Image: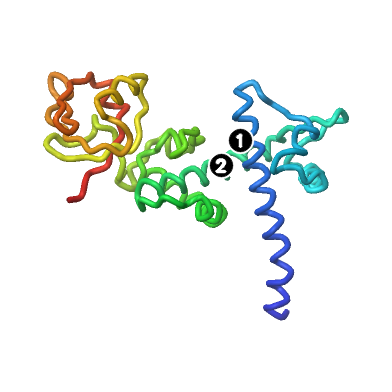
Amino acid sequence: MDKDLLKTRAAPETEKRQFEDEALESLWELFEKEGPSAENVSLEELKNSSLGNISALEGMHRDGLIEISPGGRVKFTEAGRLRARDITRRHRLAERLFADILALNEYEEDACRFEHAISPEVEEAICTFLGHPPTCPHNRPIPRGKCCKLYTKKVTPLVASLADSQVGEDYKVVFLRTPMIDRLASIGLVAGSMIRLVQKRPSYVIKVDETTIAVEEEVAKGVFVKKHES
């Protein structure tokens, strides 16, 4: 068969899958904003969102990705929920990769393209490389993967907690996962700040600019850093 004909036939299927991925991701974000108890939304609500293409949603219903009740309520099927979770996870990991490692300011379009291109193996490698980040740069939760539960060490994480870091080294804070964020922020320890780990025992001593603070191990475990390359 002619290769150009194969490409022509494959393109609509690829475009359809990408549309479905984007729609599932948008629906995931919509439920996320509504809170943990949100399970469905009405078609009427979706008309004013990026998911306003009702005929396309009906196609996703026929494909078994969403359910549309007789009353016009939309919710995920189990297959749709899993696919929405995976595409959201890949997008947010891509954002972390581009923002934290490549230090890009504009990356949303690339993250959208990237999420469709990587395999589950690459996804896990990136997650491990980044130290299994809990949130994206916009502070939205990154759905957990199998690698996060196992915390695989196949790839040495570039980002690690301060508790796993070396005394005497300089680090850049990538993100914080601790209830003490406000207290740490008041002395300048925020994402993007440069710090030095002075000691680990009996408490963790951190130098931030000209300020030195001591924190407990549980706090240090919630400060995620990458080594500063001079």
Task: From the viewer's perspective, tell me whether residue 120 is left or right of residue 168.
Answer: right
Q: Is residue 186 above or below residue 99?
A: above
Amino acid beneath label 1: Glu
Relative image position of residue 75 (x, y in whole percent): 73, 32
Amino acid beneath label 2: Thr
Relative image position of residue 128 (x, y in whole percent): 38, 43
Cα–Cα gap, marks 2 and 1:
8 Å
Q: Nearer the viewer, residue 225 or 17?
A: 225
**Pointer 2: what residue?**
88
- Mark toward the start of the polypeptide (2 vs 1): 1
Q: Secondary structure at mark 2?
A: helix
Q: Nearer the viewer, residue 206 or 188?
A: 188
Q: Name the quadrant of the N terminus.
A: bottom right
Task: From the viewer's perspective, tell me whether residue 157 is left or right of residue 60.
Answer: left
Q: Is residue 180 above or below residue 16?
A: above
Q: List the single residue furthest toward the bottom.
A: 2
Q: Residues within 10 Å of mark 2 (few under 14, many from 20)?
A: many
Q: Quadrant of residue 147?
A: top left
Q: Residue at x 31, y 34 (%)?
A: 224
Q: Is residue 157 above or below residue 215?
A: below
Q: Decide if residue 212 is in sight here.
A: yes
**Pointer 1: what residue?**
29
Relative image position of residue 27 (x, y in whole percent): 66, 37
Question: Do the residues bearing badges 2 and 1 touch, measured as CB atoms within 8 Å?
Answer: yes
Q: Residue at x 80, y 33 (%)?
A: 44
Q: Residue at x 37, y 27 (%)?
A: 177
Q: Residues within 10 Å of mark 1 (few under 14, many from 20)?
A: some
Colour basis: rainbow
Q: Decide if residue 118 is in sight here.
A: no
Relative image position of residue 9 (x, y in whole percent): 74, 69
